[in-house]
Image: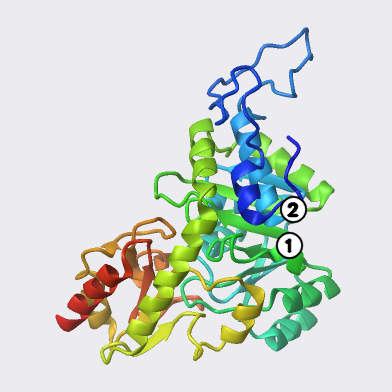
Amino acid sequence: MTDPTPDRGFETRAVHAGQAFDPTTGAVIPPVHFSTTYAQDGIGGLREGYEYGRSGNPTRTALETQLAALEGGAHGLSFASGLAAEDALLRAVLKPGDEVLLGSDVYGGTYRLIARILGPWGVGLRVVDMSDLAAVERALAERPARIVWVETPSNPMLRITDITGLARLGHAAGALVVVDNTFASPALQQPLALGADVVVHSTTKYLGGHSDVVGGALVMNDDALFEQAKFLQFAAGAVSGPLDAWLTTRGIKTLALRMQRHSENAQAVAEFLDAHPKIARVYYPGLPSHPGHALAATQMSGFGGIVSAELADAASARRFAESTRLFQLAESLGGVESLMNYPDEMTHASVRGTELAVPEELVRLSVGIESVADLIADLDRALAAL
């Protein structure tokens, strides 16, 4: 499906890319296509290229057009989960003996996928602080990597990496540069425009935005890589279902508005926590004290909705995480509701005891779009009880 809005503003693309009205009925919202198979006009005579639900579905095609338009890319692919998207990309690019240079602060599931699934297959893994470009340069000079993989802002320490600088180093070393853009979302950051080769998303998070659909995405410009990843999407079969695709599309249409509110609320929450005597340290790129603040202000159009904070000790962090009311204790992030997470035993339990382990005194807040006064009151009450 061709994007009719390539030169339009982001908000317009989010609403209209891949979303042409139904030509039969005039319905403004395209229908959800649940069919698993498609009638052919004679053997091999496919209508619009559709034959079977795993190889293609019009609702999924519409979402993939929308995803590509959001990131300013030529190609988008939608998967059943973020990890399914990552797996397809990694297997499209890597062979036994290749190595991935991974950021030292990434989602635990990404590390687990590379280390425990692809590792026994013969893929090597090294870890480096991607926000330190000198360290990245040394690592690439020491030994080549097939893929340089970064999250920025990172999960959960909110490190900021210079995407343009990283792309320069990675490309000079012959590596594919992959940016997980889940935390920022394309509403706040455009990695392809900054030199990245591939953008990865857990669409479960900000793109879906309502904690009601699991999904993942890849966006890229390289035609050959797209064909390889698309083949794996088809051959391995981890595709997004039509209702999942439609829910993600619906969420995307309000992405720009939601990210603005998430960022505003998170800034206020970060400033409140930063001034609180029971909080030892706050990680949020919107704070001038954050080491990546200046870079984030240049590279992003907003600072996002995730705030991490350290308390005095692990016991205090656990009590705090279990004491809030509006901030619900739960996995994931990026929904309209505020969530509290204790990474050491929740989202990052798979990297405990590794070089990616997160501090035991750390909590991660996914700040929603509720009244910020209510959110701060909830945090203040929980902290007062410690």
SS of the residue under disc 1: helix
Q: What residue is at 78 percent from the left and 7 percent from the top? A: 42
SS of the residue under disc 2: loop
Q: Which label number is shown at residue 290?
A: none
Distance Cα–Cα, label 1 vs label 2: 7 Å
Q: Quadrant of the C terminus?
A: bottom left
Along the polypeptide, which appears first: circle 1 or circle 2? 2
Q: Amino acid at mark 2?
A: Gly
Q: What residue is at 14 percent from the left and 80 percent from the top? A: 385
- The answer to whether residue 34 is above or below residue 245 is above
State yes or no: discs 1 and 2 in contact (Cβ < 8 Å).
Answer: yes
Q: Where residue 290 sits in the image (x, y, percent)?
A: 51, 87
Q: Nearer the viewer, residue 353 or 218?
A: 218
Q: In this image, 210 relative to 8: left or right?
A: left
Q: Is residue 111 visible?
A: yes
Which residue corresponds to mark 2? 73
Q: Residues within 10 Å of mark 1 (few under 14, many from 20)?
A: many
Q: Residues within 10 Å of mark 2 (few under 14, many from 20)?
A: many
Q: Amino acid at mark 1?
A: Leu
Q: Where residue 25 sits in the image (x, y, percent)?
A: 59, 18
Q: In this image, 131 relative to 365: left or right?
A: right
Q: What residue is at 61 percent from the left and 40 percent from the top? A: 63
Residue most extreme to the left: 385
Q: What residue is at 43 percent from the left and 77 percent from the top? A: 267
Q: Quadrant of the N terminus?
A: top right
Q: Where residue 374 sits in the image (x, y, percent)?
A: 25, 68
Report which quarter residue 153 is drawn in. bottom right
Which residue corresponds to mark 1? 192
Q: Where residue 309 sits in the image (x, y, percent)?
A: 37, 81
Q: Nearer the viewer, residue 59 or 16?
A: 16
